Amino acid sequence: MVTAIVLIKADVASIHEVAESVAALDGVSEVYSITGEYDLIAMVRVRRHDDLNDVIPGRLNKVRGIRDTETHIAFRTYSQHDLEAAFSLGLPAAD
């Protein structure tokens, strides 16, 4: 599982609509509204690194109301939960 954290700047008047549209995209597991320089954080989780291209520049960056994004790839998870098992639920088996 590959995880990307996408920081999103959105048009202020459409933050709610942007968040809902981003959350509905395949590959986006969560969207958080935040304070500070960015308006939203989207968690993108895909099976392969190459799949990030389909989700982030392919769909997420094209959502109406998004002004700018910054993507960070997570290389290691520090958690006491089995996140790999949790996020693989409902995904088709890897080939």
Image (cartoon, helix red, strand yellow):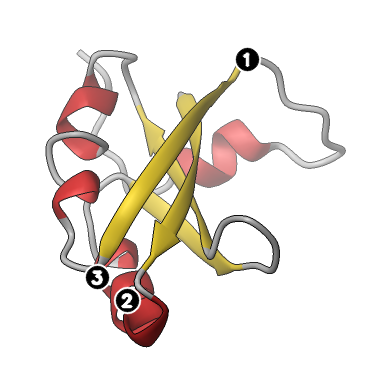
Choose between 60 and 29: the one closer to the eye.
60
Q: Which residue is rendered at x = 34% and y = 14% of the image?
A: 49
How many residues crowd mark 1 within 10 Å: few (<14), some (14–19), many (20+)?
A: few
Q: Which mark is residue 59?
A: none
Amino acid bearing label 2 = Glu
Q: Is residue 30 above or below residue 3?
A: below
Mark 3, Cα crowd under 10 Å, few <14 / some 14-19 / many 20+, is: some
Q: Is residue 17 above or below residue 28?
A: below
> Quick one: quadrant of the C terminus?
top left
Q: Label 3's element?
A: helix
Question: In the rendering, at what x and y percent does residue 24 appear?
Answer: 25, 66
Q: Residue at x 26, y 37 (%)?
A: 56
In this picture, residue 39 sits left or right of residue 93: right
* Residue occupying image coordinates x 87% and y 38%: 80
Tag 2 residue: 20
What distance separates the C-alpha of mark 2 from that of mark 3? 4 Å
Find numbered disc 1 in the image and state the secondary structure of the residue it sits on: loop
Front residue (pair 6, 51): 6
What residue lies at 57% left-to-right and 37% top-to-bottom?
85
Residue 7, percent across and down? 51, 46
Please tell me the numbered disc located at residue 21: 3
Marks 1 and 2, Cα distance to the nearest angstrom? 27 Å
Per the image, label 2 sits on a secondary structure element best described as helix
The earlier-in-sequence mark between 3 and 1 is 3
- Residue 42 in the figure: left or right of residue 21: right
What amino acid is labelled 3 in the image?
A: Ser
Mark 3 to mark 1: distance in Å?
A: 26 Å
Q: Is residue 24 left or right of residue 68?
A: left
The residue beneath circle 1 is 75
